[in-house]
Image (tube, rainbow, N blue to C red):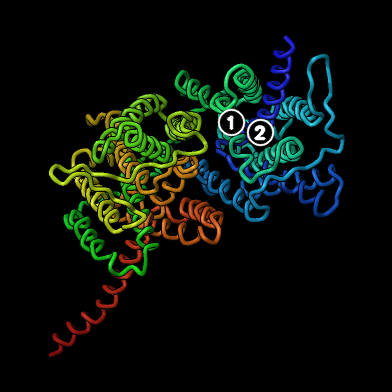
Amino acid sequence: MEFLGQVFANGLFLSCLYALLALGTTLIFGVLRIGDLAQGALYALAGYLVFLGTKQWGLEYWLAATLAVVAVTLLSVLNGHFVYRRLRNLGIGQTFLGAVGLLIVIQNLLAIGFTWEPQAVRFPWGDALVQVGSIALLPQKISIIILAIAGLIGLWLFLRRSFIGKALRALAQNREAAQLVGVNASVVTALAFAIAGALSGSTGALMATVWPLTPYGGTLLVLKAFAITVIGMGQVRGAFIGALLVGMSEALVQGYWRAELSDLVPFVLLAGALILKPQVLGPEEDEKTNQLRSRTLPVFQTNGYLRYVPLVLAGLAVILPYFLPGQFWLHLAILAGINIIVVSGLDLLTGYAGIPSLAQAGLIGIGAYTSAILAMKLGWTFPLTLIGALIVTVGAASLIGLLGLRLKGRWTSFTFIMGIVIALFIANLGPFTGGTQGLIGVPFLTFDLPGLGKITLNPYRDKLAYFYLVLAFVVLALWLKSRIVHSRLGRALVAIREDDVLAQSVGISVEHHKLGAFLLSAAFASIAGSLYAHYLAYLNPDLFTFSQSFNLFVMNLIGGAATLLGAVFGPVALTAFAELTRSISGSIASIVFGILLIISLIYLPDGLTGMARKVWARLTVRSLRRSEPKSSKILEAEEAL
């Protein structure tokens, strides 16, 4: 019983910690319909500001904590005004993606400013345990519990009793009607972001004295808070109940089972909540978003000459190695080719069908680990490892797709969660995947050719052969994509993207086509994962986290969604930039990824391909206009003669 009491106390602390962050995300996501995951970065920023104030400037803890909370609150308001205000009209999904861009930018700025080494802040009341019977807790943890209870009561009273709280609820129900009766939406929204920022800042300032500070320390916490927000159906009371459920469940798993599996608890609970009650927070897109979608994504042009683009690119790529100055550039070409394969499949789903997937990195991980394990444990050679990985990955994608399509408007959130779950499973299946230490000694890609024996491609000795192998799969991927988008399936996907209700009315099976597009994207991801595993000869769960899924999404967005060349331009440009800046700082590459994502969402919805098309169209129109006066003068001269 004594141990159970300590487990209960730890669960109460975790519940209150999650509740503080979940109250902020509930206010922003549940009321304002904005997925502000950047609160996780603000949580970490508050901790580092306290560390800076106490260690570098010699301030008292409470003064440093107060200044940190004020700074984080101000930054939260600025994020709401300059980023989310522009993205909100495009739907929750766009704010969700923009929030991840902010999360990545702020976290990596912290990594540059404070390095990766964990930092600690001393609590002014000391670290002596407070003993209540057989239960012992740090005073900081007790402060978290008190702050969470006060925050719950205060926020509930604020929303229910105050004029501004009622205005917030009115905005959530009908923004236009609320503005008509005199509600200043900009001021009320800014106040909501201020409250969320204050909650995140206060939590970060207190937790800096409990857990070591790291730049990415708030990522998993805010993801759990987001899961709790959805479980709580976007309500303050529901968020606190959801936090209690998650915190207690985690404490029980840590105490009586395996501590490393406790991080799966909120996401498993969220997946169950979404499946059992998918309408908890309404759809991610509304009618306005659907109207905007046809303007933000280009309609595919079925020009016949585009079918030959893969062959032209293949011809140019064949001679490319002879113009590259060294092995490093060949390495970049191989990585870019692998990313082209993934993004080609992702574009079928995101660009043509209009349903973004944030689980692609997890699917790549399934393909990579399956191919590596088949080669290591069973001694399989290529292409048997490729086929085995395809079967496993497509099977997993079938399960994800069937469950996700039941959620209707919550598809993007579900794939995001599934990507996290896959990465956590890979990290915790130590006997098979090597766990967090990684899978070392993945065999090089080997062919078993009849009459020739085994041929091994060692990328460390000869990258050229591996480059041509990847090139062959790139050409195959682009050719298949071209054939698909010119087929009935491709036309059906575009129809679904433009108006799924109308597509359903003319006999198109929307769910079957969406599932088919998702399975195709999973197959492309599996192929890329197999090639990636045998090229690196080492796998680690960190290679397949949700941030990698967003990198792939940025590649697709920057290159140009629903275009053939976009799947080439985006991966080539961003892979080259990431690898070239990695030697300087990997954080700089991540910052640029995050900034490019935000800029693309707001200003460049058609990507590089769309921008090039517009520039070409303008130049063509200008040339025609310039030729008109000249032609008229010639005609006048001919008539005069």
Is residue 499 at all visible to an observer of this figure?
A: no
CA gap, disc 1 and disc 2: 9 Å
For the point 37% across and 67% down, the residue is 326
For the point 61% across and 16% down, the residue is 256
Which of discs 1 and 2 lies nearer the camera? The answer is 1
Q: Are marks 1 and 2 in contact (CB under 8 Å)?
A: yes
Pinpoint residue 599: horizontal percent, then vertical percent: 50, 55
Pinpoint residue 483: horizontal percent, then vertical percent: 19, 46
Mark 1 highlights which residue? 224
Secondary structure of the residue carrying tag 2 is: helix
For the point 41% across and 51% down, the residue is 555
Above or below for 75 versus 585: above
For this rendering, which residue is in front, 355 or 308?
308
For this rendering, which residue is in front, 429 or 442?
442
Residue 513: image tag: none
Pinpoint residue 361: horizontal percent, then vertical percent: 42, 40
For the point 61% across and 25% down, the residue is 235
Above or below for 380 versus 565: above
> Which quadrant holds residue 21?
top right
Residue 21: image tag: 2
Pinpoint residue 461: horizontal percent, then vertical percent: 34, 57
Of the 4 image quadrants, the one containing the C terminus is bottom left
Label 1: few (<14), some or many (≥20) within 10 Å? many
Indicate which disc, 1 or 2, sits on the residue closer to the N terminus: 2
- View extreme (top): residue: 1
